[in-house]
Structure formats: structure tokens, C-alpha cells
């Protein structure tokens, strides 16, 4: 993307859209690092609405890492029935034990430390840094990739490790409003640029390559 004006327009419109269409979830109200970490674990491969129905009850039962570390096998099975992915629950417990013992119950605030914890990959580490500590890091998951692929006409086969995609994601990120932008693009992907996109109500359609292709068919 040699001409950055195109990218700036995308960023500006996404942030503007997010002001009026932001989804409300409990982990966005209280940005305590423990709460955000738990939410990001549960949000892995699980729709946010489904997580929201379970999250508050879980936090009330387990308000800190020491409590999560002591979850027994019976409760592991119960959580797995509700959210699926038993291995994710086991990794959350293991990570809680490490944070309790090694980090004094404080969620690490560096990428290098976070990425070493069980169950935390590139996206989850970046989400924690952004939403807990307001660090200007882009978030790239399958939903964000869908938006960027359509708008900027990336190949359909592109993935989160693609260097060009990462470069564009960094260019688009407004350093002083990274949290607002990251939340907005996630919400935009969930509400507008869905697998079956709502192009008719999309604020980006005028410049979107995907929409231009649809019009020309």
C-alpha cells in the first residue's frame, strides 16, 4: 500500500462506525487484566454472545488466578459442555497456576512473556496487550482477515502469518486510538462484513474491492 491515504480513510471510517455500533460485553466494561485474559481464552473459537452468557457467572465463582488454578475435574467437564474445547479450559488452569506462582497474580504486559503461557498465541497475546494495557498492536484473526481481504483485495488463501497482511494491519492501526480501532474492526466483522456480508448497509462499500467486484458481475 504505497499511498497511505487509502488506508487512512479505511481506519477513519472503521473508528467512526465503531462509535455508534460498539457491542457491549462485560469484559469491555471492566478491563482488569485477569478478566480480559479469561474472556480472551473463552473467546477462542467461540462466539462472543455465547461467552457473554457464561462469563459473568464464571468470574463471580472464580475472581482470581488462585481460584481458577483450583478448578476440579467435575467443573472442567461442566465448562467444556457449555463452551466446548476441554483442552482450552485445561490450558487456562495451567496458565493461571503459572501467573500465580511466577508473576505474583499479575498478567504479564509484554508479548514475549505472554506468548510463553499455555493457550496464548499471537492473537490472544496481542488482544491482552491492547485491551488491558492499551499497547498499539494490531489484532489479526480470521474475522479481521476477512474484512481486510475483501477491502484490499488480498488473495483468499491469505493467513495471519502473511508478511504483507501484517504490514498493512500495522499501517492501518492508529497508535493513539488502537483500542477503539481494534474493537471496531472486530465488531464490524461480526455485524457487517460477515461471511455473508451486509454490503447494502456497509459504510466502506464505496472503496471496497469486494463490493466493486459484486457490482461488475
Image (tube, grey):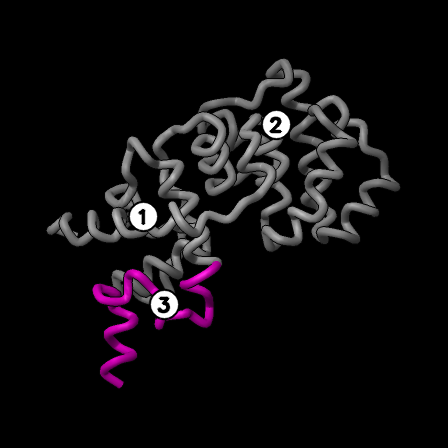
Question: In the image, 36: left or right of 50?
Answer: left
From this view, report whether residue 3 is shown above or below residue 38. Answer: below
Looking at the image, tell me whether mark 3 or mark 2 is earlier in sequence order. 2
Residue density around tag 1, few if under 14, some if 14–19, many if 20 or more, within 10 Å: some
Question: In the image, 191: left or right of 4?
Answer: right
Question: In the image, 13: left or right of 102?
Answer: left
Q: Dot 3 lies on which element?
A: helix
Chain part drawn in magenta: 191-217
Which residue is the site of mark 1? 16
Is 99 one of the magenta-colored residues? no
* Alpha carbon distance from label 1 to label 2: 29 Å
Residue density around tag 2, few if under 14, some if 14–19, many if 20 or more, within 10 Å: many
Q: Dot 1 lies on which element?
A: helix
Residue 53 place in picture, x, y as percent: 70, 48
Which residue is the site of mark 2? 34
Which residue is the site of mark 3? 201
Q: Residue at x 61, y 27 (%)?
A: 34
Q: Residue at x 28, y 61 (%)?
A: 204
Amino acid at each position: 500500500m504505497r499511498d497511505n491515504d487509502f488506508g487512512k480513510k479505511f481506519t477513519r471510517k472503521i473508528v467512526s462506525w465503531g462509535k455508534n455500533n460498539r457491542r457491549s460485553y462485560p469484559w469491555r466494561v471492566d478491563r482488569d487484566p485477569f478478566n480480559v485474559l479469561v474472556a480472551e481464552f473463552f473467546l477462542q473459537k467461540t462466539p462472543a454472545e455465547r461467552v457473554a452468557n457464561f462469563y459473568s457467572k464464571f468470574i463471580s465463582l472464580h475472581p482470581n488466578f488462585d481460584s481458577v488454578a483450583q478448578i476440579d475435574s467435575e467443573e472442567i467437564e461442566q465448562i467444556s459442555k457449555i463452551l466446548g474445547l476441554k483442552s482450552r479450559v485445561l490450558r487456562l488452569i495451567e496458565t493461571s497456576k503459572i501467573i500465580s506462582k511466577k508473576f505474583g497474580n499479575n498478567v504479564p504486559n509484554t508479548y514475549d512473556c505472554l506468548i510463553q503461557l499455555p493457550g496464548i498465541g499471537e492473537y490472544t497475546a496481542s488482544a491482552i496487550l491492547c485491551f488491558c494495557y492499551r499497547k498499539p498492536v494490531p489484532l489479526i484473526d480470521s474475522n479481521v482477515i476477512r474484512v481486510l481481504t475483501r477491502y484490499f483485495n488480498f488473495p483468499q488463501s491469505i493467513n495471519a502469518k502473511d508478511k504483507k497482511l501484517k504490514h498493512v494491519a500495522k499501517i492501518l492501526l492508529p497508535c493513539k486510538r488502537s483500542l477503539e480501532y481494534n474493537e471496531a474492526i472486530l465488531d464490524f466483522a461480526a455485524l457487517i462484513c460477515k461471511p455473508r456480508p451486509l454490503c447494502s448497509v456497509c459504510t466502506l462499500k464505496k472503496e471496497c474491492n469486494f463490493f466493486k467486484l459484486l457490482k461488475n458481475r
